[in-house]
């Protein structure tokens, strides 16, 4: 979730992460990536404007034929510039 309350979600099988307006359920932004299976995303970095996106591969043969530099199973880091809102800080682990 970003600081404006929008939900960011990895879309399995679609090469993308989407930003969703929770009041309407509409996709309002899309970040395309080179890997087909986006599995999760999270904000990070000093200013919480970097969206880290994990992806999945199903087998080593898939990794071997994927185009570089973005094979399946890679971790992507996408800087989201203005006008995108930064993410929210995660609570610290208490124990």
Image (tube, rainbow, N blue to C red):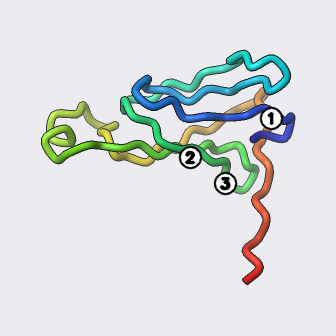
Q: For the point 16% across and 34% down, which residue is it?
A: 65
Is residue 5 shown above or below 19? below
Name the secondary structure under disc 1. Answer: loop
Q: How crowded is mark 1: few (under 14 residues within 10 Å), some or many (20 or more)?
A: some
Q: Where is residue 19 in the image (x, y as percent from the top left)?
A: 68, 27
Q: In which quarter of the image is the C terminus?
A: bottom right
Quarter of the figure with the N terminus: top right
Q: For the residue carrying disc 2, how many other residues have a C-alpha within 10 Å: few (<14), some (14-19), or many (20+)?
A: some
- Residue at (77%, 79%) from the top-left corner? 94
Q: Residue at x 76, y 71 (%)?
A: 92
Q: Is residue 13 left or right of residue 10?
A: left
**What's the residue at 45%, 31% (across, down)?**
12
- Would you name the residue on which mark 1 appears? 85
| Side (left or right) of 74 relative to 67 | right
Front residue of 45 and 54 = 54
Q: Local crowd at mark 3 within 10 Å, few (<14), some, or many (≥20)?
A: few
Q: Residue 52 carries which label?
A: 2
Tell me residue 41's x, y (percent).
Answer: 58, 44
């Amino acid at each position: 979730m970003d600081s404006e309350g929008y939900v960011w979600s990895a879309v399995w099988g679609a090469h993308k992460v989407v930003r969703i307006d929770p009041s309407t359920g509409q996709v309002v932004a899309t970040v395309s990536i080179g890997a087909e299976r986006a599995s999760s995303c999270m904000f990070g970095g000093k200013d919480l404007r970097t969206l880290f996106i994990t992806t999945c591969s199903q087998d080593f043969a898939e990794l071997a034929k994927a185009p570089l530099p973005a094979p399946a199973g890679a971790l992507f880091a996408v800087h989201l510039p203005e006008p995108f809102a930064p993410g929210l800080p995660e609570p610290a682990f208490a124990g």
